[in-house]
Image (spheres, helix red, strand yellow):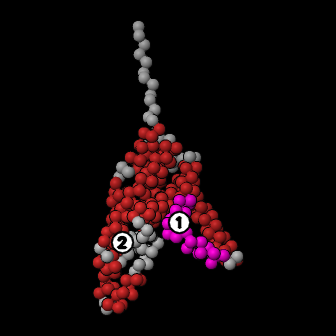
Amino acid sequence: MTTLTAPAPTTPPAFARVWRIVKLLTANPWTVVWMPLIILGAIFVLTWSIWWLLFLNLDLDQADDAAAGIQYNGASSYIFVYMLIVAVQAVNLAFPLALGYGSTRRSFTLGLSLTFLIMSIGYAILMTVGAFLEEATGGWGLRGSFFRTFYFTTDGWLVQWWVYFCWFVCFFFTGTAFAAMFVRWRAPGLIVAFGVLAVVVLGGATLLTLADGWLGFWGTIGDLGTVGVASALLVPAAIGALIGHLVLSRATPRG
């Protein structure tokens, strides 16, 4: 008599486990694709409308002054802030679901990081295309700057893409760190984290003030330039990714 033996369960390859997390996080394109695009489009239309109303009531000389002034605006920065919110939502909603499906915490954090890197690449390309169209249309017909405002760069399209990419990565992984703290410690953990951050920022500002170091600080920022500052954002991004990984590795999903 032959005894039937059930085949041993197979473990998917490491990358397959990570890629499952990527597919889980992007399963709802409304959250990670359409909503950010709608927000970006709405901000653009609103900004362009303000420009149009401004120029509508100006003569030629005043319009030249206004055109120089609208190079300085923070309208497009809202899309980066929204990506921080996307990161918080992704971690808070997908982490318990992924573990419920049998994923490991390590696979989740790796998949999360890969997802955010892919999204940063894609959205940076989108913003770069917007910058190209902005230049080609003379600032959307009004000499405005939305995608190519003062805190971005004009040093070629690849450099422009790199600046956008660094900004997106920074906000994604900053959101990851705070979301991981919420998943593990809930509201008290976030309160403590924001408190520590406030102390660090206030302490740094106090030291610069007492040492008369603000002039040197802003001089360093100026020396770094737009590309240097953007590249430096990868440092807090890496710290955020590390914090998120360490915190989630010991986090327990809660209902």
Q: Is residue 170 magenta?
A: no
In the picture of the structure, the residue carrying the numbered disc 2 is: 43
| Image position, residue 72 (x, y; %) | 43, 78
Q: Residue sitting at 42 percent across and 43 percent down?
A: 19
Q: Quadrant of residue 153?
A: bottom left
Q: CA distance from mark 2 to mark 1?
A: 27 Å
**Which is the main secondary structure of the residues drawn in magenta?**
helix
In the picture of the structure, the residue carrying the numbered disc 1 is: 228
Q: Residue furthest top?
A: 1
Residue 187 in view: no
Q: Residue sitting at 36 percent across and 71 percent down?
A: 43
Q: Quadrant of residue 189?
A: bottom right
Magenta region, residue range = 213-236
Q: How many marks?
A: 2
Residue 252 in view: yes
Q: Of marks 2 and 1, which one's residue comes earlier in the chain?
A: 2
Of residue 39 and residue 231, the one placed in the foreground of this image is 231
Q: Residue furthest right?
A: 211
| Image position, residue 86 (x, y; %) | 43, 59
Q: Is residue 219 magenta?
A: yes
Amino acid, disc 1: Gly
Amino acid, disc 2: Ile
> Is 96 drawn above or below residue 214 in the view shown?
above
> Is 71 drawn above or below residue 200 in the view shown?
below
Circle number at residue 187: none
Q: Are marks 2 and 1 in contact (CB under 8 Å)?
A: no
Of residue 5 and residue 125, the one placed in the foreground of this image is 125
10 vs 40, left or right, is: right
